[in-house]
Image (cartoon, rainbow, N blue to C red):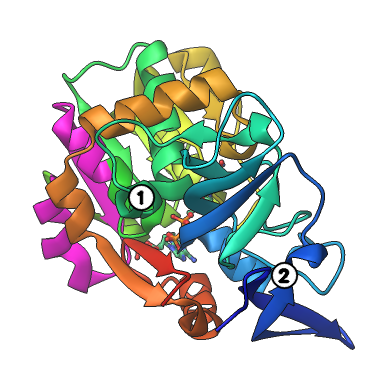
Amino acid sequence: MPGKNEFTALVLEESDGKVTSSLQTLSDDSLPDGDVTIDVAYSTLNYKDGMILAGLGNLVKSYPHVPGIDLVGTVSECRSLEFKPGDQVILTGWRVGEIRWGGYATRVRALSEWLVRVPDGLTLRRAMALGTAGLTAMMSVMVLEEHGLEPNGEVLVTGAAGGVGSVAVALLAALGHRVAASTGRAETHGYLKDLGAATIIERSELETPPKGPLGSERWAGAIDNVGGSTLATVLGTLNRGGSCAAVGLVAGPRLETTVIPFLLRGVNLLGIDSGHCPIDRRRQAWRRLAAEMPMDKLDAMTSEAPLSALAELGGKILQGQVRGRTVIDVRA
Ligand SMILES: NC(=O)c1ccc[n+]([C@@H]2O[C@H](COP(=O)([O-])OP(=O)(O)OC[C@H]3O[C@@H](n4cnc5c(N)ncnc54)[C@H](OP(=O)(O)O)[C@@H]3O)[C@@H](O)[C@H]2O)c1
């Protein structure tokens, strides 16, 4: 057990280009600068956490490093007037867990301007069941709505059984949209239908773009977690004036397409950057999540694991083998 001025953390160390992790007890003196100290309750597992745990993507600039891009907890000390000890706060993005020490620890120090209060109606655990994935799904819904999406057509979600995908499917269905969920895992079809998907699309159907620059119009909107040739297919099959929120790159960062869908169908490709989402919009997205996310569906897509399971889980999420959301109980 750590002492009063100590905390437990998953620490990454690098040697000869290989990154390894271990659970360690660290002194509070080792925490980075910041005006707020938080006792962490939960963190989560996102695709980016998998990359950081494996030392991929040059995301971490210096070791030893404490990863974890999301966290929720209780303020223990604060030099800003914005928060006081006892406040419950969410921290996601701002490159925390990459260039700053993150949430795979029982204590963190951060900047108060990054924090969002846990909105009414959300428990700490559910806040992390949502995490970056939930914020990203809600930001995608918001930007699609701002570009005219209404619940009168079919909305596609790719990488649907993953974290962002699962939240997006449940959220869109709860908002009255007809959701088409694209997955590469046959065993998740029942799960996706239970979350609210009306149609299942095989991942392979979207991997080959239409022969010409355009295919038949099908999607009123889309949330794409996959990138690569899948995103090219989506752009060529959006309805006239439809929009796609570009979220992820699990199939690769390259996009080969033409400008024709933009010129002949007036489609929109809308970038999502949850990491640097301005604070007012974050607060708005979290308030909407607390009010509009069906909590029974959120609970059904969430599993829980301790810090010690992360080395294995990090590999699994990179291989597309994690379903839904994983909450990390940092005190377990
Ligand atoms: N832009 C942002 O602000 C933002 C925020 C959060 C996440 N992201 C990105 O969004 C993506 C999803 O993140 P996540 O945390 O939800 O990850 P995740 O839980 O691993 O979900 C990704 C899903 O994509 C599918 N998939 C995996 N490998 C694939 C492949 N090679 N080809 C096609 N589909 C594949 C799988 O779903 P099926 O088995 O259902 O096919 C997998 O569950 C990642 O690229 C992540 O970096 C971006």
Q: Residues within 10 Å of mark 2 (few under 14, many from 20)?
A: some
Query: Residue 178, position in %: x, y?
Result: 15, 33
Q: Nearer the viewer, residue 180 or 316?
A: 316
Q: Residue furthest front?
A: 4
Provide the residue designation for mark 1. Answer: 124
Element at label 2: loop
The residue range painted magenta reads 169-197
Q: Nearer the viewer, residue 95 or 120?
A: 120
Residue under the image location 33 percent in, 55 percent down = 125
Q: Amino acid at mark 2?
A: Leu
Q: Quadrant of residue 180?
A: top left
Q: Describe residue 302's horizontal placement relative to residue 261 as left or right.
A: left
Q: Is residue 54 visible?
A: no
Tell me the SS state at disc 1. Answer: helix
Tag of residue 56: 2
- Residue type at mark 1: give it: Leu
Q: Give residue 38's position: percent from left, percent from top.
A: 58, 51
* Rendered residue at 52%/58% (across/down): 40
Distance between the alpha carbons at the discs numbered 1 and 2: 29 Å
Q: What residue is rendered at 58% in x and 24% in y?
A: 279
Q: Up-down: is 256 above or below 19?
A: above
Q: Quadrant of the N terminus?
A: bottom right
- Mark closer to the chain start, 1 or 2: 2
- Residue 62, horizontal then vertical, whole percent: 87, 66
Which residue appears at 53% of the width and 72% of the height? 318
In the picture, residue 211 is in which quadrant? Answer: top left
Q: Is residue 186 visible?
A: yes
Instruction: Count the marks.
Output: 2
Q: Is residue 90 magenta?
A: no
